[in-house]
Image: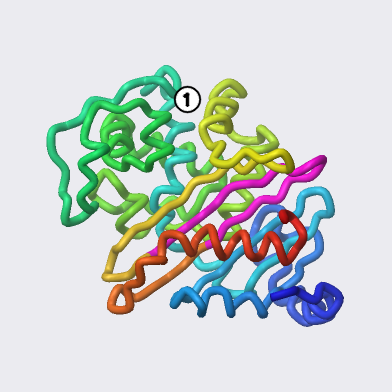
Amino acid sequence: MILRITLLIFIAAFYVSGVNGQTKGIFSKGTKIVMPNIQGYFKECGVSGTIAIYDHGNDIWFVSDTSDSKIEKVPASTFKIINMLIALETNTIKDENAVVKWPGSIDTIKYGYRPDIYRDISVKEAFQVSAGWAFIELAKKIDRSTYQKFLRESGYGNVDLTEKGEDFWNFGAMGISPINQVEFLKRLYDGNLPFSDRNMDIVKKVMITEKDKDYIIRSKTGWTREHNTNTGWWVGYLESGQNVYFFATRLIQDRKFNRSDFSSCRKEITKKVFRDLKIMQ
C-alpha cells in the first residue's frame, strides 16, 4: 500500500484543527498528516490499532487516526524503558549488568509459561527478552511515591498507580497513549528527562534491537492480556542518516479472535508504514 502524501496533506488540513493543542508536548506543534489508508494493515492482522510517528528532522507527525492515538491504555512491557531509568536513578540497580535473583515461582496463568527465563538474570537480558518477573522484583524495592514523582516529571502517562499489584504497568488504571509514548521517547533521545546522562545512555544502549548499515532501531515491545483483551505495543525510534523517527504502534484484539501472528504484527505493521513513508527499504 503506497501512501499518497500529497492527498494526505490535503486530508490533514481538515483534521489538524481537531487535534492541534489537545495534547501537551511536541504534538501541539508541527505538521500533522493523517494516514487512514493504513487501517488496512491492522485489518489484515485481525486487530484494531493505531500508530503515531514523529519525523524529527522535518517536524512532521504521521498518525493513523485523530482519536485512538490519544487514548491511554496500559503500557505493558514498554514500561520497562522508564522502569529501568527509575531503577538506575534510585540506585536500585548499579547498571544494566546487575543480576536479579529468580524468586522461585510466578503466576503462569497470569503471565504465561516461559521456563527459559526462570533463573537469575541480568537487567539487560531481562529487558531484551522481556522477563517481566525481574522488573516486578525491582518494583518491589521502589516506593509508589517515587514512581509517581518520576512519571510526573517525565510527562509519562496518567500516573494512576491505584493498582494494588506490583506490575501496575500490565494491569489496572495506569495508561499512556501512542502520542505520549512518542513524546516521552523524544525527551529520552534529547536527554530532557529527570535522569542522569549516564543512566539515559545505559538505557538507550540496552534498547538497541536492530542494527543495519542504513539504520539503528532502539525499541521495546509490550503485550498484556487484561480483561480478555490482547493489548500489544511496539515503541521506539529509528535513527537513519541525520534524521530520527520516533514511533508507537498499539494493537488491540479480543482474545476470542486470538491469532498466532498477533505478536509479529506489531513490528510488521510498523515496518510496512516505514516503507510506505520511505523511512526504510
Secondary structure beneath dot 1 equals helix
Q: Is residue 256 left or right of residue 209?
A: left
Query: Of helix, strand and loop, which mostly describes the magenta segment?
Result: strand
Q: Is residue 183 left or right of residue 261?
A: right
- Residue at image point 60% right, 35% down: 193
Q: Is residue 51 left or right of residue 86?
A: right
Image quadrant in which you'd find residue 52: bottom right
Looking at the rendered image, the quarter that the C terminus falls into is bottom right
Report x, y in % for residue 143.
Answer: 32, 34
- Residue at image point 73% right, 60% down: 28
Image quadrant in which you'd find residue 16: bottom right
Q: Nearer the viewer, residue 224 or 40?
A: 40
- Residue at image point 43% right, 38% down: 128
Image quadrant in which you'd find residue 17: bottom right
What residue is shown with label 1? 89
The 10 Å Cα crowd at callout 1, few under 14, some 14 to 19, many 20 or more, is some
205 is higher (above) or lower (below) than 268: above
99 is higher (above) or lower (below) than 2: above
The kind of residue tagged 1 is Glu
Is residue 112 located in the magenta-colored stretch of the structure? no
Extent of the magenta region: 231-249
- Residue at image point 48% right, 39% down: 82
38 is higher (above) or lower (below) than 215: below
Most extreme residue toward the left is 104
Q: Is residue 94 left or right of residue 24?
A: left
Report x, y in % for residue 271.
Answer: 62, 59
Q: Nearer the viewer, residue 192 or 130?
A: 130
Looking at the rendered image, the quarter that the N terminus falls into is bottom right
Report x, y in % for residue 73.
Answer: 43, 62
